[in-house]
Image: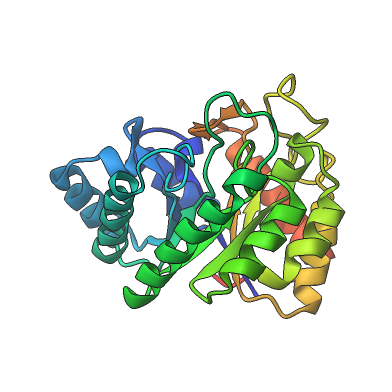
Amino acid sequence: MFTLSAFADEISSDPREQIAVLKASNIRHIEFRSIYKTNCLALTGEQIDHFKSLIDGEGVALSALGSPIGKVAIDSPFEEHLDKFKRAMELCHELCTPNMRVFSYYPPANFDGNWAPYRDEVIRRMRVKAEIASKEKIKLFHENEHKIFGDSPERVADLMKSVNHPALRSAYDAANWVFCGYDPVQGWELTKQYVEHFHIKDWKGSGEHEHTGRIPGTGDGNIAHSIKDAVQRSYDGFAVMEPHLRGGGPTGGMTGPDLFPLAVEAFRHILHACGGAERF
C-alpha cells in the first residue's frame, strides 16, 4: 500500500500554496524540507510553530523530515554535525513525524575517487546516529544522493548491511541512480531488501549536463520495475513526489504548481498499472 507525499517546496516556497496544490491533487502528506526558501533546520521556532498550526488546520501530516543531515564532508567535526542531528530529531517530535531523511557524507577536499580510506568512519557515524535515533523512536531513511558515500548501489548495500540497525533504512530514488550513471534496476535489486521509502522522480541521461527531471515514466529510471516488485513484496509506506521538472541541485528542486499535478497523475498511472493500491 502506497501513501503519496511530496517535497512540497518543489511547488512553491509559500506553505499555503504548497498545501493548496497538494490538496487539489489529493495528497495529505509533506516531506518537510523548506518553506520561504529556508531549510527546515534554519527556521525559527516561531516559523515552525506557524507551520505546525497551518498543517494541523489543513489536515496535513509529514511523511518525514526532509533534513540535510549527512550532507557534510566526512572529515568535518562530528560533534558539530551531531548537534544539528539532535535539532532535527527535536523537529521530528515537534512536527509529529517518526521519520527523517538523511545522507551518508560527502568526501573530503581533494578526493581522488577512492572511498576506502573513509568507509569505516562513514559506517561509524551512521551507526551512532541510528542508535541515537532508535532511542528517540525515529527511523532514518538514507537517500542515494549524488556525490555522497551512498551514491552507488554497492555502497548503499554495504552501508545498510554494516550498520545493520532497524532505525536505518533506505529511501530508493531511481532518478538519482540514473544521474550517477548506474542502472536503476541494478540499484533496486541490490538494495530492495532495505527499502522502506520511495522518492519519485525520473531522469534522462546521466551526468551534470542534465539538470531537469522528467515526468515519471518518461525517463530512464524504470520506475515501474521497482514499484511492481515493491507491490509484490507487500510494500506499505510512502511514495514521495520530487519531480525536479524545472531543475534541481544539492539543496532541492523546482517543479511549480502547474507541472506538479502532471507528475502526480503520471506516477498514479504507473502505480495502478503495477497493481499497486493507494492509501488516502
Give percent across and percent down for residue 189.
83, 63
Residue found 52% across the figure and 44% down from its top = 105
Question: Image quarter for residue 97?
Answer: bottom left
Q: Position of residue 183 (x, y in %)?
A: 86, 47
* Front residue (pair 42, 115): 115
- The x, y position of residue 187, in whole percent, is 79, 55
Decide if residue 4 is on the left or right side of residue 115: left
Q: Nearer the viewer, residue 193 or 79?
A: 79
**Relative height, residue 150 to residue 9 (above, below):** below
**Quadrant (top left/top right/bottom left/bottom right) for the N terminus:** bottom right
Q: Where residue 114 sits in the image (x, y, percent)?
A: 69, 38
The residue drawn where x is 83% and y is 57% is 224
Image quarter (top left, top right, bottom left or bottom right) of the C terminus: bottom right
Is any atom of residue 259 visible in this view? yes
User: Which image quadrant is residue 88 in?
Assistant: bottom left
The reply to whether residue 197 is visible in this rendering is no
* The residue positioned farthest toward the front in the image shown: 117
Residue 195 vs residue 23: left or right? Answer: right
272 or 8: nearer the viewer = 8
Residue farthest bottom in this picture: 234
Q: Decide if residue 86 is on the left or right side of residue 175.
A: left
Q: How is the image coloured?
A: rainbow
Q: Is residue 126 left or right of residue 261?
A: left
Residue at image point 80% right, 30% down: 206
Extreme-left residue of the structure: 46
